[in-house]
Amino acid sequence: MYITNTELRVRYAETDKMGVVYHSNYFVWFETGRTEYLRALGYPYSRLEKEGIMLPVVECSAKYKKGAQYDDEIIVQTSVSELKGASVTMCYEVIRKETEELLVTGFTKHAITDKKLKPVKLKKENPELWAALQDCI
């Protein structure tokens, strides 16, 4: 299984009145992790879009265990958990770097589509990317 680690620092604007990260920010961090994961594979979103491949989110979830706080350094660990003909599921773990505490787990499921959001079979449409993702599982 191939995993990338994306390091971030919690900004003040990402916290709520209770001093913890507001829940929706984790999904932004998932996107950051996913973007860096694909970039590490040689497929940044800009390349995918030029090649006519889109990855709209069709399902997402997060399970909150502990809250990150302002100025925490965090690591977003990203991996691929499932690859089907026209969908891919990415998994995430958000970890507090200093203590290695697991803060949040989650996933995003993506349809694999063309620019008109019509599903495409990635194995046929882009066998190189299909193979790269398949090797990551």
Image (cartoon, helix red, strand yellow):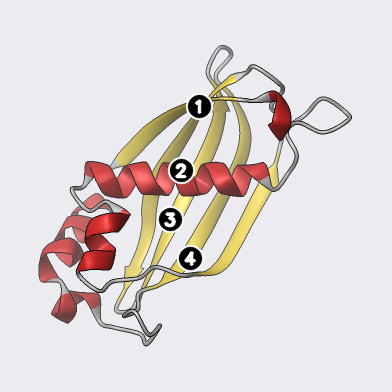
Pointer 2 with pointer 3, Cβ within 8 A: no
Q: Is residue 103 above or below residue 37?
A: above
Numbered mark located on residue 109 in the image: 4
Report which residue position mark 3 lands on.
Answer: 90
* Nearest to N terminus: mark 3 or mark 4: 3
**Alpha carbon distance from label 2 to label 3:** 12 Å
Q: Which-is-in-front pick, marks 3 and 1?
A: 1
In whole angstroms, how far apart are the C-alphas of marks 2 and 1?
9 Å
Q: Residues within 10 Å of mark 1 (few under 14, many from 20)?
A: some
Query: From mark 4 to mark 2, how far is it between C-alphas?
Result: 15 Å
Q: Can you identify the residue that label 1 sits on?
A: 8
Q: Nearer the viewer, residue 101 or 73?
A: 73
Nearest to viewer (mark 4 / mark 2): 2
Residue that numbered label 2 is attached to: 32
Tag 2–tag 1 contact (CB < 8 Å): yes
Q: Amino acid at mark 4?
A: Lys
Cβ atoms under marks 3 and 1 closer than 8 Å: no
Mark 3 lies on a secondary structure that is strand
x and y percent of residue 60 in the render? 59, 62
Location of the C terminus by quadrant is bottom left
Looking at the image, residue 109 sits to the left or right of residue 44; the answer is: right
Q: Residue at x 37, y 85 (%)?
A: 116
Question: Of the residues shown, which amino acid type is indicated by label 2?
Answer: Thr
C-alpha distance separating marks 3 and 4: 6 Å
Q: Amino acid at mark 1?
A: Leu
Callout 3 amino acid? Met
